[in-house]
């Protein structure tokens, strides 16, 4: 895929119309959707205030501890 592309399966005319309407809305409000992000030097985008911390979701130590308790 190229930059700015998306993968969307459209199975019905209603799906296509809904997708077209959503894309039109995004294009008409480009500044609104871009403003929360900074573009990084390699072209990626990073949200200005949300930062995902995988440690809140997954901890190797906790998984090992749980496995050790099961034995």
Image: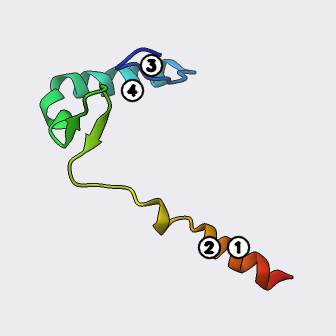
Question: Of circles 3 and 1, which is in front?
Answer: 1
Contact, CB < 8 Å: mark 1 with mark 2?
yes
Label 2 CA crowd tier, 10 Å (few <14, some 14–19, many 20+): few
Q: Which residue is mark 3?
A: 16
**Where does the image place residue 51, in percent across and percent down from the top left?**
32, 55
Under circle 4, the secondary element is helix
Can you identify the residue that label 2 sits on? Answer: 61
**What is the C-alpha distance between the residues marked 4 and 1?**
46 Å
In this rendered view, identify the residue nearer to me: 19 or 49: 49
Task: Specify whether 35 is left or right of 15.
Answer: left
Q: Quadrant of residue 16?
A: top left
In the image, farthest residue toward the bottom = 69
Q: Please tell me in which quadrant of the rendered image residue 53 appears.
A: bottom left
Helix, strand, or loop for circle 2?
A: helix
Whether label 4 touches label 2, CB < 8 Å: no
Q: Residue at the location (57% across, 68% down)?
A: 59
Instruction: Name the residue: 40% across, 19% down.
Output: 5
- Decide: marks 3, 4 in contact (CB < 8 A)? yes
Residue with the mark numbered 1? 64
Name the disc covering residue 18, or none.
4
Disc 4 and disc 1 in contact, CB within 8 angstroms: no
Circle nearer the N terminus (4, 2): 4
Q: Is residue 37 above or below residue 54?
A: above
Q: Is residue 28 above or below residue 58?
A: above
**Distance in Å between CA atoms under marks 3 and 4:** 5 Å
Separation of residues labelled 3 and 2 (CA atoms) = 46 Å
User: How many angstroms separate mark 4 from mark 2 (CA)?
Assistant: 45 Å
């Amino acid at each position: 895929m190229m930059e700015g592309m998306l993968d969307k399966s459209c199975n019905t005319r209603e799906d296509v119309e809904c997708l077209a309407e959503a894309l039109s809305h995004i294009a008409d409000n480009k500044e609104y959707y871009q403003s929360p992000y900074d573009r990084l030097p390699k072209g990626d985008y990073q949200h200005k205030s949300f930062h995902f911390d995988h440690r809140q979701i997954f901890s190797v130590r906790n998984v090992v501890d749980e496995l050790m308790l099961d034995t």
